[in-house]
Image (cartoon, coloured by chain):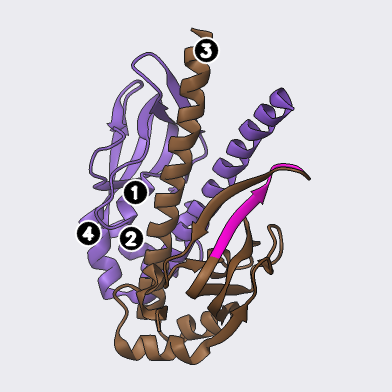
Chain colours: A brown, B purple
């Protein structure tokens, strides 16, 4: 069981982890199956147990831009489901048959409402995760501008 | 006083806001003064009371890439100070004389440790803020790839 190794669950007590396990559903996924699409209401957060998942965004009808390939058991995705009333900002497609844990947004919100210490830890871990992703995205943008600057100067 | 209108403090009770005010220090800033530099340990979170602040990142010695110009009283910046042991991911420079509220990271961590409900709300607001910034950065990246795709196809 790799749910516990998800970076969002770091620093969480055994009791809190048991409660999280209580709302997690094990689901099988098949290669090429879509788990969610960019722009859809984010109702589920997922943790990879085994197999692999591609996160992608569509540049246009023909061109997919890869965001990440998740292979490590315990990888969490669909983080938008942890932001109140948010939509998925990428699409997720199964790249290899496997198993996932699926956590329902409303059940997680209820759990957090009953245990603010858990909520504080989860949200702090989520903020750290998004902070790192934002730093990486800005570095990539900077690399684009650097190339542009070199071309024009 | 615009501290209360900061997006990170949404949904916080009057009592919790009073506690936050208790650890906030009012400071004057002068045009062209650096408030922090990218890569420095993030020890302070700031809220704009009046004046304006530029957030920038250096592409190279000669070229600054603007990230945001903050003019609205209540704008928060230096969010990295709310992520445990993180460095600032942009630099901040005063664009117009003004007044700021400065909140010390260690004092805020202490407050959150004593009040997990406050911590949960603050971290959830921070995660939402970073989620939107990440979505915007990825949209910008996508626009770059779209231009590139049009040029090469």
Name the mark nearer the viewer: 4 or 1. Answer: 1
Is there one chain holding both mark 2 and mark 4?
yes
Name the mark nearer the viewer: 2 or 4. Answer: 4
Question: Residue B131 — which label?
Answer: none
* Label 4 – label 1 distance at C-alpha: 15 Å
Q: Position of residue B139 (x, y in %)?
A: 62, 42
Instruction: Tell me the element at label 3.
Output: helix
Q: Which residue is mark 1?
A: B80
What is the magenta range?
Answer: A53-60
Instruction: Tell me the element at label 4.
Output: helix
Question: Residue A151 — which label?
Answer: 3
Which of A136 and B4 lies nearest the eye of the viewer?
A: A136
Question: Residue B107 — which label?
Answer: 4
Marks 4 & 1, CB-CB < 8 Å contact: no
Residue B20 to residue B47: above or below: below
* Sequence order check, earlier mark of 1 and 2: 2
Is there one chain holding both mark 1 and mark 2?
yes
Taking the image as shown, residue B36 lies to the left or right of residue B54, namely left
- Residue B149, magenta (yes or no): no
Residue that lies at the very extreme toward the top in this rendered image: A153
Instruction: Tell me the element at label 2.
Output: helix
Q: Position of residue A31 (x, y in %)?
A: 64, 69
**Mark 4 crowd level (few <14, some 14–19, many ≥20, 10 Å Cα):** some
* Label 2 – label 4 distance at C-alpha: 9 Å
* Label 1 – label 2 distance at C-alpha: 17 Å
């Amino acid at each position: 069981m790799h749910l516990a190794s998800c970076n969002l669950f770091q620093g969480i007590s055994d009791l809190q982890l048991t409660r999280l396990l209580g709302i997690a559903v094990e689901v099988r996924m098949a290669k090429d199956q879509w788990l969610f699409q960019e722009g859809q209401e984010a109702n589920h957060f997922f943790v990879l147990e085994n197999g692999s998942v591609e996160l992608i965004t569509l540049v246009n009808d023909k061109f997919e831009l890869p965001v990440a390939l998740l292979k490590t058991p315990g990888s969490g995705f669909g983080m938008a489901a942890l932001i109140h009333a948010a939509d998925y900002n990428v699409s997720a497609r199964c790249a290899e048959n496997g198993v996932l844990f699926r956590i329902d947004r409303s059940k997680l919100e209820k759990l957090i409402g009953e245990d603010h210490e858990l909520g504080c830890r989860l949200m702090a871990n989520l903020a750290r995760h998004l902070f790192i992703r934002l730093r990486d995205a800005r570095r990539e943008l900077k690399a684009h501008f650097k190339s542009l600057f070199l071309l024009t100067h």
